[in-house]
Amino acid sequence: MLETIKGGLVVSCQALPDEPLHGADIMKKMADAAKQGGACGIRANGTADIEAIKEYTGLPVIGIIKREYEGSSVYITPTLKEVREIAEIGADLIAVDATNRTRPGGIELPEFMQTLKERFPEQKWMADCSTLEECIQAEKLGFDCVGTTMVGYTAETAEKRLYHDDFQFLKDVLKQVKVPVIAEGNVITPEMAARVLELGAHAVVVGGAITRPQQITERFMSEIKKA
């Protein structure tokens, strides 16, 4: 999959149960619309969506399962249970939270990744990171690529954004990490997507700016109210 998406746009097609577009049938059509627009891959949440999108579009899929556990703030593919569910349906790349936060059951990332590589030796892995240190560690642990997905979504990075200072965080990661770096997180304009690829990102993932009409509408309304 990494070669397929190199230099391209991956569209994140996700809708949670409380959102109007929730459902595999809707998401597969959203993914098909993204494909027709030129997307080279899809990021999807949940086995039903992943299976439907792969069958309907034929595009490679970055698979995740968002699931919350008491006592841990990690919710993107947090345990072996979610990994097994995704691996069994053939996701091309599985993304997991690779922050320094403790996983459910008190498991730390090095132990978790060692288990994954032993159980699923042929699977490819994406690390969803929030700091430069996490990206460096993810590479050392054997992840096939790292993503900037979690910047701004952890307590440590709450005030940061991927796009600050002309994507300085991404530039720092690209200098320190040799595995492919996927730019993801608050990339909300075509210009921003083009810029991260220009800087050297392997690929760019865009979600809400394309596939969440409620968020797009909110941005329009925010500017209208200011006017």
Image: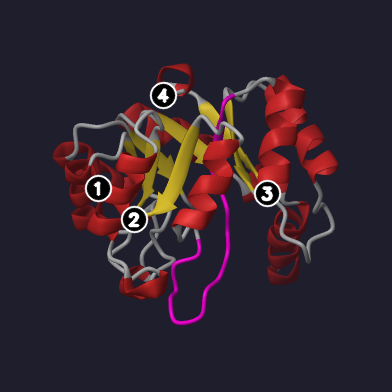
Amino acid at circle 3: Gln
Number of residues whose C-alpha sits closer than 10 Å to that of mark 2, classed few (under 14), some (14–19) or many (20 or more): many
Helix, strand or loop at mark 1 = helix
At mark 3, the secondary structure is loop
Task: Tell me the kind of residue under disc 2.
Answer: Ala
Image-based side of 174 in relation to 194, left or right: left
Residue 184 figure quarter: top left
Q: Which residue is mark 1?
A: 138
The circle on residue 2 is: 4
- Residue 98: numbered disc: 2
The percent position of residue 73, horizontal first and vertical second, equals 44, 74
Q: CA distance from mark 4 to mark 3?
A: 21 Å
Asked if residue 131 can be seen in this view, the reply is no
Magenta segment: does it hold 203? Answer: no
Q: Secondary structure at mark 4?
A: helix
**Mark 3 burial class by Cα count in 10 Å: few <14, some 14-19, many 20+:** many
Query: Closer to the N terminus: mark 2 or mark 4?
Result: 4
First of labels 4, 3 by sequence position: 4
Residue 14: mark:
3
- The majority secondary structure of the magenta stretch comes to loop
Q: Nearer the viewer, residue 59 or 47?
A: 47
The C terminus lies in quadrant: bottom right
Label 1, label 2: how far apart the Cα atoms are: 7 Å
Mark positioned earlier in the residue sequence (3 or 1):
3
Name which quarter of the figure residue 38 lies in.
top right
| Mark pair 2, 4: CA separation | 18 Å
| Residue range highlighted in magenta | 60-75
